[in-house]
């Protein structure tokens, strides 16, 4: 399965929340995410060894929102976005199922717009 390309616009100093629903098949049906965990990393470039941020279900920055409806959300707290020293990054997000199957569901670019009010 090819991951969806979704670019994310984060505004430094603001809480970022993006809800995503994963559907597959013809006709599209929501994927059951019960028991799944997720992980995502931000890097300046795909081959860069430096991780700018890590988002996981364990650290609360990814939430399996409505598992039976295939929904999860990405949450970047204001305190985290304020600390971003970069303006652009690449990412991908993987879901890990209970049988340890790993599926990359989305990927793209993240833009962190500077904050004027501090």
Image (cartoon, rainbow, N blue to C red):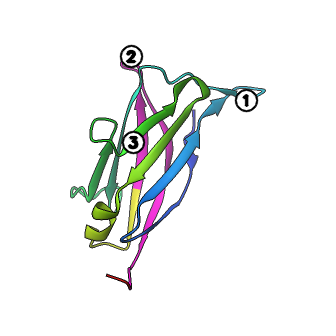
Q: Is residue 42 left or right of residue 34?
A: left
Q: Of the numbered discs in the image, which one, if any, rests on residue 115?
A: none
Which residues fall within the magenta stretch? 91-116
Does the magenta segment cover residue 109? yes
Percent coordinates x, y for residue 7 in the rendering = 53, 59
- Eyeballing the image, is 11 above or below 71? below
Q: Is residue 32 above or below residue 8?
A: above
In the image shown, does 31 or 25 lie closer to the viewer? 31
Q: CA distance from mark 2 to mark 1?
A: 22 Å
Determine crowd level at label 3: few under 14, some 14-19, many 20+ residues with C-alpha closer than 10 A: many
* Nearer to me, 111 or 107: 111
Picture residue at 34% right of the left edge, 36% below the top: 57
Mark number, residue 28: 1
**In this view, which residue lies farthest toward the right?**
27
Q: Which mark is residue 62?
A: 3
Magenta stretch containing residue 112, yes or no?
A: yes
Mark toward the viewer: 3 or 2 = 3
Q: Label 2 belongs to which residue?
A: 98
Regarding residue 44, the answer to whether it shows in the image is no
Query: Residue shown at 42%/43% (left/top)?
Result: 93
How far is disc 3 from disc 1 in space, using C-alphas? Answer: 23 Å
- Badge 2 crowding class, 10 Å Cα cut-off, few under 14, some 14 to 19, many 20 or more, is few
| Mark found first going from the N terminus, 2 or 1 | 1
Q: Position of residue 34 (x, y in %)?
A: 47, 20
* Residue 27 in the image, given as x and y percentages of width and height: 78, 27
Q: Residue at x 37, y 71 (%)?
A: 12
């Amino acid at each position: 399965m090819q991951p969806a390309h979704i670019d994310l616009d984060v505004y430094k100093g603001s809480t970022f929340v993006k809800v995503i629903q994963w559907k597959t098949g013809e006709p599209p049906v929501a994927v059951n995410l019960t028991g799944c965990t997720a992980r995502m990393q931000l890097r300046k470039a795909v081959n860069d060894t430096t991780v700018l941020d890590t988002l996981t279900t364990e650290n609360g920055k990814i939430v399996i929102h409505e598992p039976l409806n295939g929904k999860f959300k990405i949450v970047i707290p204001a305190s985290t976005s304020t600390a971003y020293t970069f303006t652009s990054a690449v990412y991908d997000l993987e879901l890990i199922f209970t049988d340890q199957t790993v599926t990359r569901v989305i990927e793209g670019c993240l833009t962190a717009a500077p904050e004027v009010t501090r």
